[in-house]
Image (cartoon, rainbow, N blue to C red):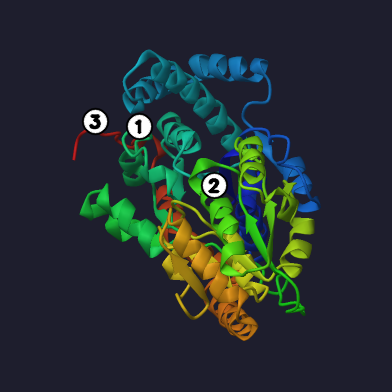
Amino acid sequence: MPIAYLNSEYPSLSHTFIEREVRQVRAQGLDVITFSIRRPGRTGTIGSAHARAARETRYVLDGGARLIGSIARGLATNPLATIRTILSGQRLSPPGLGARVWHLAYAIEAIRLAQMLAHERVRHVHVHMANNGASIALLATRYNPRLSYSLTVHGPSDFYHVEPIRLRQKAENALFVRCISDFCRSQVMTWTDPTHWDRLHVVRCGIDTGQFRPADRDAQGPIRLLTIGRLDPIKGQHILLESCAQLDAMGVDWCLNVIGDGSLRADLECKAGSLGIADRVTFQGAVSQDDIRRHLDAADAMVLSSFNEGVPVVLMEAMACGLPVIATRVGGMHELVEDGVSGLLVHASSVGSLAEAIRTLAQDADRRRAMGEAGRLAVVAKYDIAQTASGMVDVFDGHVESRVSVGEQSDPRDARAPVIPEPNAR
């Protein structure tokens, strides 16, 4: 039985781990068809794997005529289900005219998705992120109650807007919820009834540890710092630049390579200039997965200054390549980085503690090497993509196969649509 993977935008450079997961679960026997609400943005198809993923993905928003045709076909062939889906969308919506309009659009897109899934003989859809893609998957099950959906929750942004995105309703109506860390699971547990906790599974994201391997590094010269991530306020890159500006007074010779793009690029470039460090900071922009390994091999340490995180895949890649890492003690970071063993954890927003951690590694090449070795061992043990994908296959087998087996024995007219509770009901 084929399973659909649905995302709001796929492929996406910042969500490379989804494309990897799809490839690996296919390799382990799952028949996966990828769907996306909208087509990828400018950087979404950078790299051969992402370009291939875009070509094989079905897109819900693939022309206004198709959407209109879907709602017309729904009204003509299944008017009660169409009306039920639209009303469910309004019930799911937060207050406000704008939100109501958006959820009307989500209902129409859900009807289109349900029809596309039926055409592909798909009965289950898995969604990454608890955003509008999850809303559309939930509403698709209102249109066709024989459909089911499951959800991967990453955080941290999902936990900033729990009520507006209706995290509880999405989690409780899902066949199961995959949480990418123990910390993530605890946050979902906070917002869901304990009767649903047995369907919350921790399955970590993973990387190909055969692809990301240690390289020979020259310990001479300035310490070469690397940071990877979208240029966004949550990533705390202003703090990193201020920390680097303190290193000269500490007697540290350094340079910084910044990989990623986003709304803050011009502001960060200006910040580097005002701190007098622009000549030692290189802004690379977006880089494909085909090229990311070259930047990892050229670095001495990876630094993430984020104000919040889930469990960053870029840190897994760096650790697998034998790099020591410096990261903030937030979210699920401590589940990946063992402070003092595979890296250093510092207080978020603390310029001084981040600068001191960089100095610690800059002055001790042997410690950098030992931390890099420990980090690779940790990633190989818990975050190899073959292992994590196997965990996903097991969860699918446990929930989806049993549901389909029961469903095949029952009359589809007996299938009931999931109940969407009132937003504030507990």
- Tell me the kind of residue under disc 2: His
Point out residue 214 in the picture as x, y percentages from the top left corner: 71, 77
Which residue occupies the extreme left position in the image?
Answer: 426
Point out residue 100 in the picture as x, y percentages from the top left corner: 39, 17
- Tell me the kind of residue under disc 3: Glu
Which residue occupies the extreme front position in the image?
Answer: 249
Point out residue 317 in the picture as x, y percentages from the top left corner: 64, 66
Pick the quarter of the image with the C terminus.
Answer: top left
Q: Is residue 262 visible?
A: yes
Task: Name the quadrant containing residue 95.
Answer: top left
Q: Which mark is residue 238?
A: 2
Q: How many marks?
A: 3
46 and 147: which is toward the camera: 46
Tell me the mark number nearer the camera, choosing from 1 and 3.
Answer: 1
Identify the element where label 1 is drawn.
Answer: loop
Give the residue pinned by disc 3: 422
Identify the element where label 3 is drawn.
Answer: loop
Q: Residues within 10 Å of mark 2 (few under 14, many from 20)?
A: many
The residues bearing labels 2 and 1 have C-alpha atoms spaced at a distance of: 29 Å
Tell me the mark number nearer the camera, choosing from 2 and 1.
Answer: 2
Identify the element where label 2 is drawn.
Answer: helix
